[in-house]
Image: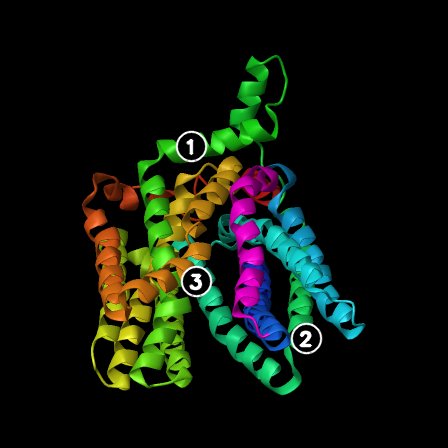
Amino acid sequence: MLETETEKEKAGRARLRPLAGVLAAILVAHSGTRISAIALPWFVLVTTGSATQTGLVAFCEMGPYVAVKAFSGPLVDRVGPRRISWIADVVSAAAALTIPLLHARGMLSFGTLLVLVGVIGTVRSPGDLAKDVMIPEAAGLSRVPLERATGLQGVVERLSGTVGPAAGGALVGFVGPMVGLGVNAACFALGSLIIAMALPRAMGRPQERPAEKATAAEAGGRDGGYWHSFRQGFAFLRREPMLLTLSVMLGITNLLDAAYAAVLIPVWAKESGHGPAAIGLMLAAFSITATLGSFVAAAVAHRLRRRPVFFLGWLVMGAPRFLILMTDAPLWVVAAVIGVGGLGGGFINPIIGAVTYERIPPDMVGRVRGIGEALTWAGIPLGGLLGGAAVAGVGLAPVLLTAGVLYFLTTNLAGLRPEWREMDRHRGKAAGGPNLPATPVETARAAS
């Protein structure tokens, strides 16, 4: 009997290997990025003393990241997400490691730093997209409901957002920013090893492209090429009102969130007299409860109606975070409101991921998600700039009120639009359903 149980446990671990491998690669890569997000700005600030140069370094990473994501989807679909993820992590590791090596030899100029940071942002973009694209295939192979798989992805991303900054702060504080950048390089290298060695060999391969094959056949056998693939992805997104509306909505909320984190909370902490410790407390309160919310979503979201849960999450996460900063409430009350918002926010990303993966044909996931994510991220590089200019022009309180109202209108009143009714109509295409990639492993299993 014990032997039988052991065999079942082995079979269970083997079944979960695809999803566990992708999630592990996401965790280490994102954690390294969060460490770098503390180490790199601190290094520039203490070596140059210039806040402008510090902001320029951040822009040189995020600008290419957002721009490249829009155009990397066809490449991911054609080459295969596994290969793209591996190559991106290897190049990112090499570029990240070059920074401390050049600094140790006294050869790191500011221009060289900008180039290396730009390289990291450029290649990290398709690498992150490739890992996301493998989630539905991994869910199907692991026989895990798609909402649960995307919920676990949300947990992993929230954990990296909690552990990464804590580790980055400790590393920078005790041993210096260059060690933090070295750890970032090691995380990228580990992510590449996981993708190369831990995933099943048949996973993450290029998908068959029936739409493009049909077009090529009509054109006398000539493949439409990269730009044809890109136009197909853009045309598909434009024909899907719910996905297009979702991308625009997330673009606005991400811009407001970027202003909130980069400008509004720090200014509030200074003007209220709570100091920088309050910044860490507020961000930690949100991150911890968002992780908890993602855990709960991973367990039960596939049993719930998506639409009410989705908009209730936005209701408690969005405007209250901005409006509470306008009051003279005690610090624990502010932390509690932000923490409740994080709990609601933990349910949002799993639903977004499940809805997106279900509605996109498997041979077009990369290009459609790439374009959609570029739209949702487009405002992030500008959020801090616009938030800072607005606070300087009219003061903190009016900006907080305006941002809170915009957040409410964007997320909740937009939910009255008719396309959101489609949110619960594709649930039959969950993990293992007809809209997921059919891998050789699944084909063989069906044939047997």
Disc ID at residue 178: 2
Residue at the image point whose x is 22% and y is 55% from the top: 308
73 left or right of 239 in image: right
- In the rendered image, the quadrant that contains the N terminus is bottom right
Q: Are marks 2 and 3 in contact (CB under 8 Å)?
A: no
**Inter-mark Cα distance, 1 to 2:** 44 Å
First in sequence: mark 1 or mark 3? 3
**Highlighted range, magenta:** 49-77
Instruction: Find residue 432 and name its label.
Output: none
Residue ranking furthest to the right: 105
Say whether marks 1 and 3 touch (CB < 8 Å). Answer: no
The CA span between labels 1 and 3 is: 26 Å
Identify the residue position indicated by label 1 in the image.
236
Mark positioned earlier in the residue sequence (2 or 3): 3
Residue 106 placement: quadrant: bottom right
The residue drawn where x is 34% and y is 45% is 248
The amino acid beneath tag 2 is: Met
Q: Amino acid at mark 3?
A: Gly
Q: Nearer the viewer, mark 1 or mark 2?
A: 2
| Relative image position of residue 443 (x, y in whole percent) | 57, 39
* x, y percent for residue 132: 52, 52
**Mark 1 is on which residue type?**
Phe
Say which of 3 and 193 sits in front: 193
Element under disc 1: helix
Q: Position of residue 230 (x, y in %)?
A: 53, 33
* Residue 28 position by quadrant: bottom right
**In this orientation, which residue lies closer to the viewer: 141 or 305?**
305
Q: Magenta residues: mostly which secondary structure?
A: helix
**Category of crowding for the residue at label 2, using alpha-carbon neighbours closer than 10 angstroms: few (below 14), some (14–19), many (at least 20):** many
